[in-house]
Image (cartoon, rainbow, N blue to C red):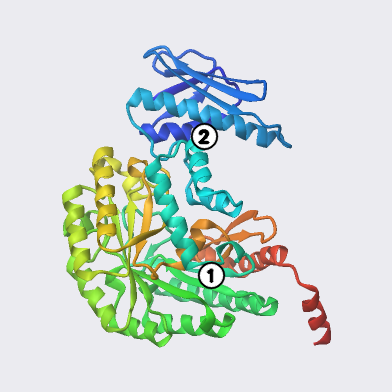
């Protein structure tokens, strides 16, 4: 679908309008231009400011469609803030035209961002009553009542699990990335490399990771900064050997401050074909009982199609094995919209999940990530259409509600089927604190390991600075000392020494 937008000249609108167009059409192109184009869908948009209001109009000729938006106009201190007002009304009328043109309703309105619940948290922090927040989200972003209700449920659960969520800026969480998997899944773009034949790279990587843990832990101890949660992700953290896992957790306890008081430690075992008794015994030894065992689907043909080299039966067997070895908080991921799957296949997966009843179930909607094998070879993979995907999401929501699971975190992705979302459900009290913290961006997350991303959040201003380690093991091994130093420099800038720390240092 080719779209030409006329009437406005500012090219800064293009990216946002393109993201909205992508909600409706695959492979759409959009350009702000005064040029004529015979094969393009032309939309004329005008913006005027008059008597304290901003007016936006959009219209098309063939077919004849129109939309209008009027909103109060506030004088802003910066041009960037003024443009943001204009962008909102332009987005409204542009979305309205495309909804009329396609007959689709976007339940998330003009939102194209990843973390919609942050909007509701911001209103809560500002003391806005619930009814005013609902009105604000509907009018400002065109979010439907259904999605606003989901946001409310999630925010309530988050504040129940972390009552000090808005006062946790002075602590940090740690993400430790292990960039190895048995095989690479077709939909995956995480930094993950097939582990076979790479034992040398694994050893070198782990040496660098131990160094990062030691130096980061030393700095945290010196500053007296607490760790809220620790999350081992990847890749698959259980792809390494039991001995390597044991040494890594030993390093964690030795280097990090007061690990015994950390609120939560999670190991995303993920792939059932990496879970064995010796590894489970290591987890138990270090008091780690929160893991993920991710089936994604309970149809063997689907697992083969997406490149997972385990069977459905292996998922079930490894779940029971983990329970036997003391894993008391298990998450299981399911993906809606995998190749050749519809509501019948999802219902089968839910029926199988019911036999296991893990503490939490995360329902992902398939996203065609830019560099994944599934995206690069999209013609090979037949996936459900928008209507079917929405039915699958409704089915998953109802199943979770009927079985006593509550939604507690949510995020969205680009190119996600049906413009839907990924939702984490859990038995009340079993929610993952790390998942809440990473999604709501309320504290610094320090990423350690190959491909690990850090988010440095200034406790005073809330400004977010992103920093990523190299994604491939060789680059990581060549530069982990430099990257560790850079991260500590970032930490120094947002957690400056306090006067009493300087005094203590002089006394020593």
Q: Secondary structure at mark 1?
A: strand
Q: How many marks?
A: 2
Q: Secondary structure at mark 2?
A: helix
**Few, some or many C-alpha atoms within 10 Å of disc 1 (few <14, some 14-19, many ≥20)?**
many
| Precedes in sequence: disc 2 or disc 1 | 2
Quarter holding residue 416:
top left
Within 10 Å of disc 2 (Cα), the crowding (few <14, some 14-19, many 20+) is some
On screen, residue 441 versus residue 501, left or right, reads left
- Give how far across and how far down residue 230 sits, in percent: 50, 72
- On the image, the x and y values in percent for residue 164 come to 56, 67
Residue 192 % position (x, y): 40, 62
Query: In the rendered structure, are the residues bearing label 2 and label 1 in contact, judged by CB atoms less than 8 Å apart?
Result: no
**Quarter of the N terminus within the rendering:** top left
For the question of whether residue 380 can be seen, the reply is yes
Name the residue tied to disc 2.
16
Q: Residue at x 29, y 58 (%)?
A: 401
Q: Which image quarter is the C terminus in?
A: bottom right
Q: CA distance from mark 2 to mark 1?
A: 32 Å
For residue 327, the mark is none
Q: Which residue is mark 1?
A: 174
In which quadrant of the rendered view does residue 172 lie? Answer: bottom right
The residue located at (23%, 43%) in the rendering is 382
**In front: 236, or 226?**
226
In the rendered structure, the answer to whether residue 312 lies left or right of residue 482 reads left
Q: Is residue 371 visible?
A: no
**The image quarter in which residue 361 lies:** bottom left
Give me the residue at 79% from left, 78% from top: 500
- Residue 274, percent across and down? 31, 73
**Is 336 located above or below residue 7 in the figure?**
below
Image vertical order of residue 381 relative to residue 72, above or below? below
């Amino acid at each position: 679908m080719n779209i030409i937008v006329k009437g406005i000249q500012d090219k800064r609108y293009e990216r946002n309008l393109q993201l909205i167009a992508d909600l409706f059409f695959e492979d759409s192109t959009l350009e702000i231009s005064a040029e004529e184009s015979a094969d393009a869908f032309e939309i004329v948009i005008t913006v005027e400011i008059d008597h304290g209001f901003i007016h936006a109009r959009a219209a098309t000729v063939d077919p004849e469609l129109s939309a209008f938006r009027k909103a109060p106009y506030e004088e802003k201190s910066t041009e960037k803030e003024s443009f943001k007002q204009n962008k909102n009304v332009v987005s409204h009328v542009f979305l309205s035209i495309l909804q009329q043109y396609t007959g689709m309703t976007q339940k998330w309105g003009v939102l194209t961002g990843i973390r919609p619940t942050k909007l509701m948290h911001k209103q809560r922090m500002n003391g806005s009553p619930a009814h005013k927040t609902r009105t604000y989200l509907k009018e400002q972003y065109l979010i439907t009542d259904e999605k606003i209700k989901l946001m409310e449920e999630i925010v309530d659960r988050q504040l129940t699990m972390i009552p000090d969520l808005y006062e946790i800026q002075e602590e940090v969480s740690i993400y430790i990335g292990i960039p190895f998997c048995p095989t690479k899944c077709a939909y995956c773009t995480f930094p993950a490399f097939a582990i076979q034949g790479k034992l040398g790279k694994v050893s070198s990587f782990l040496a660098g990771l131990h160094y990062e843990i030691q130096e980061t832990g030393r700095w945290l101890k010196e500053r007296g900064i607490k760790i809220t949660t620790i999350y081992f992700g990847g890749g698959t953290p259980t792809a390494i050997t039991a001995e390597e896992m044991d040494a890594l957790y030993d390093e964690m306890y030795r280097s990090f401050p007061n690990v015994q008081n950390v609120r939560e430690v999670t190991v995303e075992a993920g792939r059932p074909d990496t879970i064995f008794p010796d590894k489970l015994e290591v987890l138990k030894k270090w008091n780690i009982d929160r893991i993920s065992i991710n089936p994604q689907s309970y149809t063997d043909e689907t697992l083969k199609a997406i490149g997972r080299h385990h069977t459905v039966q292996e998922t079930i067997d490894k779940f029971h094995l983990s329970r036997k070895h003391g894993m008391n908080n298990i998450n299981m991921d399911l993906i809606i919209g995998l190749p050749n799957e519809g509501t019948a296949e999802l219902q089968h997966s839910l029926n199988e999940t019911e036999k296991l009843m893990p503490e939490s179930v995360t329902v992902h909607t398939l996203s065609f990530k830019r560099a994944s094998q599934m995206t690069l070879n999209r013609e090979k993979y037949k996936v459900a259409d928008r209507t079917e995907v929405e039915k699958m999401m409704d089915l998953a929501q109802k199943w979770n509600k009927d079985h006593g699971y509550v939604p507690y975190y949510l995020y969205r992705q680009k190119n996600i089927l049906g413009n839907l979302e990924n939702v984490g459900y859990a038995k009340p009290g079993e929610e993952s604190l790390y998942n809440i913290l990473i999604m709501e961006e309320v504290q610094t997350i320090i990423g350690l390991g190959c491909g690990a991303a850090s988010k440095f959040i200034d406790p005073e201003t809330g400004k977010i600075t992103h920093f990523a380690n190299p994604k491939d093991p060789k680059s990581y091994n060549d530069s982990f000392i430099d990257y560790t130093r850079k991260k500590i420099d970032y930490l120094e800038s947002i957690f400056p020494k306090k006067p009493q720390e300087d005094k203590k240092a002089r006394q020593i």
